[in-house]
Image (cartoon, rainbow, N blue to C red):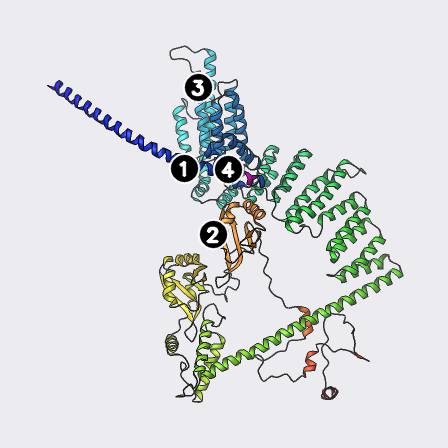
Amino acid sequence: MAAVGGAAEEEMREARASEDEGEKEGDGEEEEADGESEESSGEGEDEDAEKENEAEIQRLEEQLSINVFDYNCHLDLIKLLHQEGELVKLRRARQKMSELFPLTEEIWLDWLKDEIRMASENSERDKIYDLFERAVKDYICPEIWLEYAQYSIGGIGQEGGIDKVRSIFERALTAVGLHMTKGAAIWEAYREFENAILETVQPAAGSVPSAEQQQTVSAQLGRIHVLFRRQLGIPLLDMEATYAEYEEWSEEPVPEAVIRNYKKALQQMAKCKPYEEALLVAETPKLAEYQAYIEFETKAGDPARIQLTYERALAENCLVPDLWARYTQYLDRQLKVKELVLSAHERAVRNCPWTVKLWNQYLLAMERHHVEHELISENFEKALNAGFIQATDYVEIWQAYLDYLRRRVDFTQDSSKELEELRSAFAHAIEYLKQEVEERFSESGDPSCTVMQTWARIEARLCNNMQKARELWDSIMTKGNAKYANMWLEYYNLERAHGDTQHCRKALHRAVQCTNDYPEHVCEVLLMLERIEGTLEDWDAAVQKTENRLARVNEQRVKVAEKEAVLAKQEAQRAEQQKPSRAEKKRAAKKSRKFKTGEKRKADSDDGEWGREEEEEAEQPSKRHKTGGGDTLAEEEVEDMEMETGLFGKNMPTNAGLRPKEAAAASKWKDTPKTFHDSEKDNVTVFVSNLSYSMAEPEVKLKDLFADCGDVVEVRPIFTNKGVFRGYCYVEFKEEKSALKALSLDRTDVEGRPMFVSPCVDKNKNPEFKVFKYSTVLEKHKLFISGLPFSCTKEELEEVCKAHGNVKEIRLVTTRAGKPKGLAYVEFENEMQASQAVLKMDGLTIKDQIIKVAISNPPARRFPEKSEAAGRAMGPRQIYGARGKGRTQLSMVPRALQRQSTPMAKAENGMAQNPAAPSLPMAEEPKKMSNADFARLLLNK
């Protein structure tokens, strides 16, 4: 029965299976029909996508033909070619990019894997090996070294294959074996390889090994022992597991020396572990964490670990020039290994080609290690084509190369090939700065002609060719340097040391005639020369020339001082004229408010004027806001005047002249007790300004606006005495972190104006506090764009900029009212992208306007200083009382005398045209006049 039941069950299963197969066949036919329709539509979409990709590939190739240094363009082209499967073009694109830039670990691994798949014959293994050798030179990458070693194991069957694998593993251990987090993978792969070799040399089970086999097995076991012991002496993560594995694998007890090294490595790992943990949790770019790690290793003093830490930092921050500069400087001064030093310098300039400092260090390193002259010259030409972002960078690289050429010359010989090359290079440098650099930057970068000065010194001091030096200095002076005393004195010192007295005298006479900045100093030098070496005639000529020159200079200075005095006086008069107009306006407003009790305003026009004036005052309240609140001086004066009228019985309610609504608002504000800011709560308070004066209910609006930052305790808006909002307020939070979060809302658009949010700081106690949060120094990764149309939006500008690199931030500069100024700052990911964007975007037309693009380098803020000469010309400042100059303190001096700042000497036929110039550039004080003098003056008039 059981057998029968089992057979029946089996038949049922077979029937169900046949039914399922039938259903599957039916479903398969339906799916096939649907698949055919989907496939036909999918083929059309694929064709369109292929055409788009081909067009994009062509566009990228054309862009690279214009600018081969466009890094992002290379990446996009490689990505598209990889998608399309264009392996030949892909290989060519990767090859071109690797010649210009070091490739990242991801790009190298993708390239290596593609080449390994395409390599079908063993003869192509050498090409793969060459590619790996290029890959490991760009950065210290444990993954690439591991891939290299594992690939080499595939060639173990070739002659010398085992030795080659061991050689690659040893190089990998030297490069990344000390890597605390990733180095263990190299050690384990090496041990696994040696264990596999051990399995192949073991004798067969049950057989008696020969002496040669025993020796081979013993040698292989020794290799594995050595690998374990070497690894246990290095601080690596998970060292305990490696030690336990060694104890289990080894048939002998672990030697005491190995245990001591292991414990020492554990202690060192414990010291390094905080730095490794900081790197694990830190966000990119981790510069501060790496810098702390480098300082720690530098104090420890292990060169290999210092080098590895630098390499790890550079692998993640390859576009930071300062990090490369510190690393190469360490190698130059400490390790001094030629191959290592030159390789690091080469990688530095390939990663940051726009940094002239790295090129200078590279040229010095090549000279220091006696590299061939042709190679140094070739790298110098590469530096000129690197695309520096400042004109002075080209001057600096030329000076470094000319210094190198000068050190090659043997000046004991009258003529040599090296000397002619040096002179030719000087001439080329001057021509290059004049044409190439000046055309690009509108300046040569060398206004004081330092290159020509260096050439002149070399000709005079080392070549004894003073004639050539004079020709060079003559050219220097014709380039606008003749007005500077220091340039003439530099030439004079050269003539004094290597020329003759005649040319010294000639130079100083020209200097006295041409110098504008310090003519007195040049005159002193000329007189000193004639006092020591000149004849009486020479002395007389020098004295006459210097006196005439100084007289003209003093006349010019007096004229300048008088002009400044006149301008200052006019400015003061304009200021005096403006004061009465403001006072009259206040009196008119005061008078219109203080009409008699019960008196009705007679004309509707007057009421209309009063309403318009009140509206204007509401729209444009006083701009003299003070941090910390308080009313303006004018309002305080009005309040004082109202109190005074009350003493005489003529006072009226303050709100009598206002409209009912405005009067109610003002009365409400007057009745509200004033709340003063508590400075002890500055840490939980922010100062909000630049708000619209017409904002209705600012407390409610701002409380809602800052609600996301945390619990808002109070919003204290500042009002005028009339109840008009003054455009700023204090927002107090419950916690300090909420106030810090509120600062992120700075420049948020509120009712069409950018709202300013800044920390609440008492400037009386902290006068140096600045709320300007943007950098005011040179930022090579940020661009300054001017000439933008006012209608240009942030999105439109980003669309233009992102074609030249990764845009991190765009800031459109606006007025306090939120209106655009046509200026913008664009921050790129690195300096290279910014420099390429300058080349491409400068002079670009956006909405029929030509924009100007430059690296962001804001000029230093200049604070106006009162001219000393003007102060002297205007005479001593009159001192008034504590309340300033009163309105009744009228000047009783006639206007005719007020116009004359200095008395003019009277000639026979009028005023003297050339009055005697004083010895100092200051005007004489007017002579005091008696009453008789005034009478004569009035009678003559």
Query: Marks 4 and 2: which is nearer the front?
Result: 4
Task: Give me the disc on residue 194.
Answer: none
Is residue 55 rendered magenta in the image? yes
Q: Which residue is mark 1?
A: 45
Disc 2 to disc 3: CB gap under 8 Å:
no
Q: Earlier in the sequence, mark 2 or mark 1?
A: 1
Q: Residue at x 36, y 33 (%)?
A: 39
Asked if residue 65 is positioned above or below residue 521 in the image, the reply reads above
Q: Which residue is mark 3?
A: 198
Q: Which residues are magenta?
A: 54-64
Q: Is residue 911 left or right of residue 712?
A: right
Q: Which residue is mark 4?
A: 57
Asked if residue 61 is positioned above or below residue 939 in the image, the reply reads above
C-alpha separation, residue under disc 4 versus residue under disc 2: 26 Å
Q: Which residue is mark 2?
A: 795
Tag 1: residue type? Answer: Glu
Q: Is residue 880 left or right of residue 546?
A: left
Query: Marks 2 and 3: which is nearer the front?
Result: 2
Tag 2: residue type? Answer: Glu
Q: Residue at x 64, y 76 (%)?
A: 877
C-alpha separation, residue under disc 2 versus residue under disc 1: 30 Å
